[in-house]
Amino acid sequence: MYYIGIDLGGTNIAAEEKKVVMAQLFNDAGIIGSAMLAI
């Protein structure tokens, strides 16, 4: 769903959605990275 917001581009809503999505991706990557280091 967030791809639709990014594709619209130029709108504040799309920019906010993109920031939220990127934050979630980095957060998920951080959790996965920490779990792998723990192993």
Image (spheres, rainbow, N blue to C red):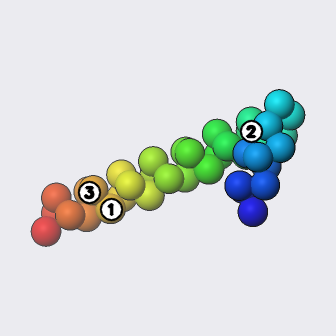
Image coordinates of residue 35 in percent, x first then y, are 25, 64
Relative to 13, 16 lies left or right? left
Point out the tag, 2 or 3, that comes first from the N-terminus. Answer: 2
Give me the residue at 78% from left, 55% from top.
Answer: 4
Q: Secondary structure at mark 1?
A: helix
Compared to residue 18, the image places residue 33 above or below, namely: below
Which label is found at residue 32? 1
Mark 2: give few (<14), some (14-19) or many (20+) Cα within 10 Å: few
Quarter of the figure with residue 12? top right
Query: Label 3 amino acid?
Result: Ser
Mark 3: give few (<14), some (14-19) or many (20+) Cα within 10 Å: few
Residues marked 1 and 3 touching at CB (< 8 Å): yes
Residues marked 2 and 1 touching at CB (< 8 Å): no
Gap in Å between the C-alphas at discs 2 and 1?
24 Å
Q: Is residue 12 visible?
A: no
Q: Secondary structure at mark 3?
A: helix
Quarter of the figure with residue 18? top right
Residue annotated with mark 2: 16
Compared to residue 8, the image places residue 29 above or below, namely: below
Give me the residue at 75% from left, 63% from top.
Answer: 1
Image coordinates of residue 33 in percent, x first then y, are 27, 56
Gap in Å between the C-alphas at discs 1 and 3?
5 Å
Which label is found at residue 34? 3
